[in-house]
Amino acid sequence: MILLSLFVFTGFSEIIQYTNVKRFIIQECRKYPSKKINEKVIHAIMYWESRLMRTNIELYDTRAKSFDKCLGLMQIKKCTLDTYNWRREKYLKKLSIPYNYLKMKHLYIPEINLKVGIWCFAFWLTRTKGDIYKALTLYSGGAKGYERKVMNKIISLYIYER
């Protein structure tokens, strides 16, 4: 279940490329068919949340930590775990996360962080009746301009793909 072979350990951080987790993200997004979550949206969120700024290649820090104490690739807060009462079994079964893997330190494991982040984004997408701009604003905790930056990255991903 947990693919720990995806990382390069550099001493302080574990650095990954998007290609290392792309298949996993696509698989997780398919668990929410009614929400139609595109993997490019998750890629764009990761880009703004945990990308290493001083590189030409898109590298991501799995041990990223913000001043708000948000952790990992998708920058999950402790209050997110508390708010949604993650320890309830129905959420754990849906996300296929063992009960003992639901502590803050486990958010540094890319697969767990991505599962929780994608679930949270799907939750906000449902609450906003599919409005991606509002869902991104809620995901970011109301950060100004966040949805615009993420949407610009999504557009660039589609242009680059062609």
Image (cartoon, grey):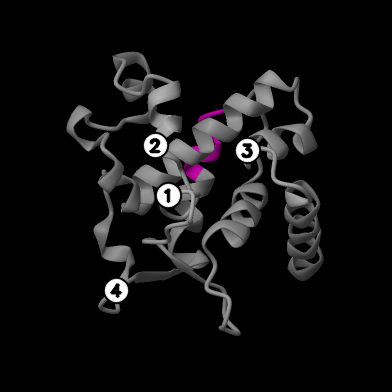
Task: Tell me residue 92's x, y (percent).
Answer: 32, 24
The three-letter amino acid code for the residue at tag 4 is Phe
- Circle 1/circle 4 CB separation < 8 Å: no
Q: CA distance from mark 2 to mark 3?
A: 13 Å
Closer to the N terminus: mark 4 or mark 3? Answer: 4
Q: CA distance from mark 4 to mark 3?
A: 27 Å
- Quick one: which residue is furthest to the left in this view? 100
Q: CA distance from mark 2 to mark 1?
A: 8 Å
Q: In the displayed structure, would residue 7 be above or below residue 146?
A: below
Residue at 60%, 61% (x, y): give it. 47
Q: Which residue is mark 2?
A: 78
Quadrant occupied by the N terminus: top left
Closer to the N terminus: mark 2 or mark 3? Answer: 2
Query: Which class describes the residues within 10 Å of circle 1: few (<14), some (14-19), or many (20+)?
Result: few
**Residue 144 numbered mark, or none:** none
The three-letter amino acid code for the residue at tag 1 is Lys
The image quadrant that residue 158 belongs to is bottom right
Q: In the displayed structure, would residue 48 be above or below residue 13?
A: above
Closer to the N terminus: mark 2 or mark 1? Answer: 1
Foreground label between 1 and 4: 1
Q: Which residue is mark 1?
A: 69
Residue at 39%, 30% (x, y): give it. 81
Residue at 67%, 32% (x, y): give it. 36
Q: In the displayed structure, would residue 112 be above or below residue 64?
A: above
Q: CA distance from mark 1 to mark 3?
A: 13 Å
Q: CA distance from mark 2 to mark 4?
A: 21 Å
The image quadrant that residue 142 belongs to is top right
Q: Nearer the viewer, residue 13 or 70?
A: 70
The three-letter amino acid code for the residue at tag 3 is Gly
Closer to the N terminus: mark 2 or mark 4? Answer: 4
> Element under label 1?
loop
